[in-house]
C-alpha cells in the first residue's frame, strides 16, 4: 500500500570518486511510492530530452492512470544535487531498470549503490554513458556478470516523407488475428531483444493493444506485417513491435505499415518515437527513409 507521504529520503553516504571536484556534491536520493507525485517531480526534467526519455515518460504517465494491479511496487527514484534533479530511474518488476540521462555520472553510481542490495534486478536500459556507469558500479558491488543484449538508437519523427508504398493496406488488428500476432510478437522479442517472455504475457500484450486499438496489420491478401504503438508522452508516442515474417520481407511492407501509422499519430501528436537495433542496418535505413532521425544511443544490459 502506498504511504500517505508519497516519498522519502534515503540516507546514503556518498564519497565522490574524485576528491578534487570543482563543485562540492550534495546529492540526495529520493524514493517515491506515489506515481503521481513522482511524475510531477520528473516531468520537466525528462521533457528536456523527450525522445531519449520516452520510455520513462510513457511508463510513469501510464502508471498514473492505471487501474491494473501490479505484481509489485514500482521503483521510482530521483537524485538531486543542491535541490536540482540530476538523474532519475524507474523499474516495474520484473522488468529492467530504466535510467534517464544524467547531469553527473556520480548520480548514476548513487542509484547503482542503492539498488545493489536487490539482486533480482534483471538488467538496465539507459543512454550509453549512463548504462556503462551503472553496470561498472553494479558489477563492482555485486560481483554479478552482465551481457549487452541490444545496442539501440532512439529516433524521433516530426514529418512523414513520401515513400513508394507496398501492395496492400493498413487495418486494425482483430480478435481473429490473436494466434498469428501472439506468435509474431514472440518472434519479434526473440529476434530484436533476445527475450523469451511467457505465453501469458503475449496474450496480455495482444488483449491490451486490441482494447486500445493500437495494434495494426498490413494486409496484402493475407496479413504480412504488423506494428503497434504505446507509451504516450506529453508531446509524442512510441511505435513498437514492428515485425514482418522472413518470408514476406523485402517488399516494403514494414515501411508502408510504419509510415501509415506514423502519419495517423502525427495528426494527434507532435512526435513519434521509435527504437532500433544498431546491429540491424536494414531497419535503421527503413525508418530514416520515412523521416525518423536518430536522437541518442542506448544500451540494454541483462544481469546474470
Image: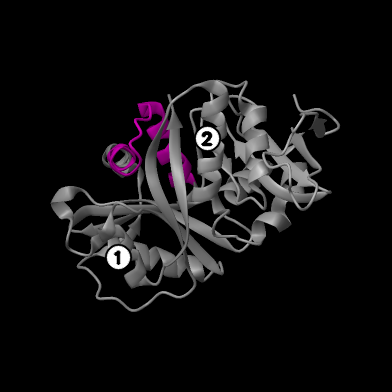
- The structure residue drawn at horizontal position 38% and vertical position 34%, both measured from the top left corner, is 202
The part of the chain drawn in magenta is 186-211
Q: Is residue 188 magenta?
A: yes
> Is residue 260 rendered to the left or right of residue 32?
left
For the C terminus, the image quarter is top left
- The structure residue drawn at horizontal position 66% and vertical position 62%, both measured from the top left corner, is 48
Q: Residues within 10 Å of mark 1 (few under 14, many from 20)?
A: few
- Residues marked 2 and 1 touching at CB (< 8 Å): no
Depth check: give the residue in front, 139 or 271. Answer: 139
For the N terminus, the image quarter is top right
Q: Which mark is residue 136?
A: 2
Q: Position of residue 113 (x, y in %)?
A: 65, 29
Residue at the disc numbered 1 = 285
Depth check: give the residue in front, 184 or 136. Answer: 136
Q: Is residue 200 visible?
A: yes
Q: Position of residue 243 (x, y in %)?
A: 29, 50
Main secondary structure type of the part rendered in magenta: helix
Q: Is residue 85 magenta?
A: no
Which residue is at the far left? 247
Q: Position of residue 210 (x, y in %)?
A: 43, 45
> Is residue 165 rendered to the left or right of residue 159?
left
Q: Position of residue 7 (x, y in %)?
A: 80, 34
Amino acid at each position: 500500500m502506498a504511504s500517505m507521504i508519497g516519498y522519502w529520503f534515503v540516507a546514503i553516504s556518498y564519497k565522490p570518486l574524485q576528491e578534487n571536484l570543482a563543485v562540492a556534491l550534495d546529492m540526495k536520493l529520493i524514493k517515491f511510492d506515489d506515481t503521481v507525485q513522482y511524475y510531477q517531480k520528473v516531468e520537466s526534467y525528462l521533457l528536456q530530452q523527450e525522445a531519449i526519455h520516452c520510455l520513462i515518460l510513457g511508463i510513469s504517465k501510464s502508471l498514473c492512470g492505471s487501474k491494473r494491479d501490479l505484481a509489485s511496487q514500482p521503483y521510482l527514484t530521483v537524485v538531486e544535487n543542491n535541490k536540482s534533479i540530476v538523474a532519475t530511474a524507474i523499474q516495474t518488476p520484473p522488468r529492467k531498470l530504466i535510467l534517464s540521462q544524467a547531469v553527473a555520472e556520480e548520480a548514476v553510481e548513487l542509484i547503482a549503490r542503492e539498488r545493489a542490495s536487490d539482486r533480482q534486478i534483471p538488467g538496465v536500459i539507459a543512454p550509453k554513458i549512463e548504462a556503462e556507469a551503472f553496470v561498472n558500479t553494479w558489477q563492482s558491488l555485486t560481483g554479478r556478470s552482465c551481457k549487452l543484449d541490444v545496442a539501440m538508437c532512439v529516433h524521433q519523427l516530426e514529418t512523414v516523407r513520401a515513400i513508394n508504398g507496398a501492395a496492400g493496406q493498413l487495418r486494425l488488428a482483430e480478435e481473429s488475428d490473436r494466434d498469428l500476432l501472439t506468435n509474431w510478437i514472440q518472434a519479434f522479442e526473440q529476434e530484436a531483444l533476445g527475450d523469451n517472455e511467457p505465453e501469458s504475457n503475449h496474450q496480455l500484450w495482444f488483449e491490451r493493444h486490441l482494447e486500445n486499438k493500437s495494434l495494426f496489420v498490413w494486409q496484402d491478401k493475407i496479413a504480412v506485417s504488423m506494428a503497434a504503438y504505446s507509451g504516450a508522452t506529453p508531446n509524442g508516442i512510441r511505435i513498437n513491435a514492428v515485425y514482418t515474417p522472413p518470408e514476406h520481407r523485402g517488399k516494403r511492407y514494414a515501411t508502408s505499415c510504419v509510415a501509415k501509422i506514423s502519419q495517423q499519430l502525427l495528426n494527434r501528436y507532435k512526435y513519434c518515437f521509435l527504437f532500433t537495433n544498431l546491429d540491424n542496418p536494414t531497419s535503421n535505413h527503413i525508418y530514416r527513409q520515412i523521416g525518423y532521425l536518430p536522437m541518442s544511443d542506448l544500451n540494454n544490459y541483462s544481469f546474470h
